[in-house]
Amino acid sequence: MELVDFRHQIEIKVQWGEMDAMGHVNNASYVRWGESARMEYFVDTELFEHAVHVPILGFQSLKYIAPVVYPDTIRIGTLVDEIKSDRLKLKSHFFSEALSRLVLIQYHEIVVLDAVTGKRVDVPQTMIEKIRLFEGN
């Protein structure tokens, strides 16, 4: 996939303090950047507008492809890759401007909680409709 394949994108400026002793961005930074991408996706798709349903992270994995160093700008494209009855599977691709390439792929599995009981529920149809409207499918 290319960055243009993602309707939702954010930009992250790499900070000097995100580098580790190995001379590249520390893995914890990618997790934070992915969280920012995920949260902005939720806001842009209006998934947080559900007063009774709360999307939360149930699982994540990261595939490191190439190291990133300061200075650089990372563009992260995020989309819902799969909708299951009990979870949403999101995918984010991290692209480096300095390297002109894909540097990381992150997978996020989102579960939905009932805001009152705190118990897990199936993905509400209203959330599915908002995602499909936003993604254009």
Image (tube, rainbow, N blue to C red):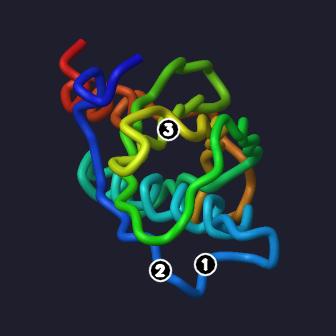
Mark 2, residues whose alpha carbon is within 10 Å: few (<14), some, or many (≥20)? some
Residue name at image x 74 percent, y 48 percent: 58
Query: Tag 3, which secondary structure?
Result: strand
Mark 3 neighbour class, 10 Å CA radius: few under 14, some 14 to 19, many 20 or more = many
Secondary structure, mark 1, is helix
Q: What is the spatial separation of the Cα atoms under label 1 and label 3, in whole angstroms?
A: 20 Å
Q: Position of residue 64 (x, y in %)?
A: 71, 40
Q: Amino acid at mark 3?
A: Ser
Which residue carries the number 3 mark?
Answer: 92
Gap in Å between the C-alphas at discs 1 and 2?
5 Å
Q: In the displayed structure, does residue 81 sit left or right of residue 1? A: right
Q: Give the amino acid type for the residue marked by disc 1 in the picture.
A: Glu
Numbered disc in front, either 3 or 2: 2
Q: Is residue 105 left or right of residue 44?
A: right
Which residue matches tag 1? Answer: 18
Of all residues shown, which one is farthest toward the right? 21
**Residue 35, numbered label:** none
Q: Position of residue 110 (x, y in %)?
A: 62, 43
Q: Pointer 1 and pointer 3: residues touching (CB < 8 Å)?
A: no
The residue singled out by tag 2 in the image is 15
Residue ID at (19%, 26%): 133
Identity, as a three-letter code, of the amino acid under mark 2: Gln
Which residue is at 63% across, 41% downward? 66
Q: Earlier in the sequence, mark 1 or mark 3?
A: 1
96 shown above or below 123: below
Point out residue 62 in the picture as x, y percentages from the top left corner: 72, 42
Q: Residue lying furthest bottom in this view? A: 17
Which residue is at a point 63% across and 68% down the rendered structure image?
29
Front in this rendered view, residue 99 or 91: 99
Measured along the vertical axis of the image, is residue 116 above or below residue 50?
below
